[in-house]
């Protein structure tokens, strides 16, 4: 199942969702309403190669907890992502076994290409 992990209250996520092709065949997973499971995070890790790649350094908690001045390990990134949804980079798309993380223009072009192949 192709999935988008997003935050419903995030303006950027809402804008991206509106721009998706109408026949996209995606399951929507709001990470605030339905927190990701350990198994889901481990699958994302397997596809991305690291927990750090999945971790949002833009999160306000990242700044308020002063995490940028700490030396975080992969185990730390995993722990923080599971503790609070805001630490998961978003949106995250999993399409045909491939992961797309974040909202950069290049990433979104790849997502649109992948969705149009379906």
Image: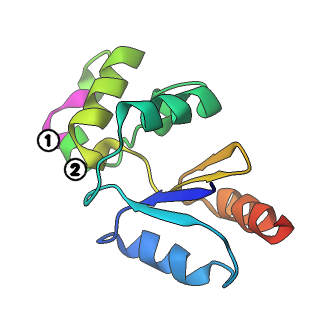
Which residue occupies the foreground of this view, 103 or 41?
41
> CA–CA distance between discs 1 and 2?
6 Å
The coloring applied to the image is rainbow
Mark 2 crowd level (few <14, some 14–19, many ≥20, 10 Å Cα): few
Q: Quadrant of the C terminus?
A: bottom right
Position in image of residue 81 (x %, y %): 31, 36
**Could you tell me residue 56's position as x and y percent?**
39, 43
Q: Nearer the viewer, residue 58 or 30?
A: 30
Magenta range = 63-67
Magenta stretch: residue 117 in it?
no
104 or 100: which is nearer to us?
A: 100
Q: Magenta part mainly helix, strand or loop?
A: helix
At 28% from the left and 49% from the top, the residue drawn is: 86
Instruction: Classify 71 as above or below 112.
Output: above
Q: Which residue is mark 2?
A: 60
Residue 63 left/right relative to 36 = left
Find out whether residue 66 is within the magenta segment: yes
The residue pinned by badge 1 equals 64
Tell me residue 98's x, y (percent). 70, 44
At 45% from the left edge and 54% from the top edge, which residue is drawn? Answer: 90
- Residue at image position (63%, 56%) is 2
Image quadrant assignment for residue 97: top right
Residue 6's disc is none
Mark 1 touches mark 2? (CB < 8 Å): yes
The N terminus appears in which quarter of the rendering?
A: bottom right
Q: Secondary structure at mark 2?
A: helix
Q: What x and y, as percent, mark residue 8?
A: 34, 70
């Amino acid at each position: 199942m192709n999935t988008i992990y997003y935050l419903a209250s995030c303006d950027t996520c809402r804008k991206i969702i509106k721009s998706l092709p109408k026949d996209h065949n995606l399951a929507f997973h709001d990470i605030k309403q339905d927190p990701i499971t350990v198994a889901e995070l481990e699958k994302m890790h397997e596809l991305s190669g690291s927990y750090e790649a999945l971790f949002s350094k833009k999160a306000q908690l990242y700044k308020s907890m002063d995490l940028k001045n700490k030396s975080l390990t992969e185990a730390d990134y995993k722990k923080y992502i599971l503790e609070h949804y805001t630490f998961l980079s978003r949106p995250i798309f999993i399409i045909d076994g491939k992961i797309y993380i974040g909202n950069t223009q290049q990433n979104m072009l790849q997502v649109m290409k992948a969705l149009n192949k379906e």
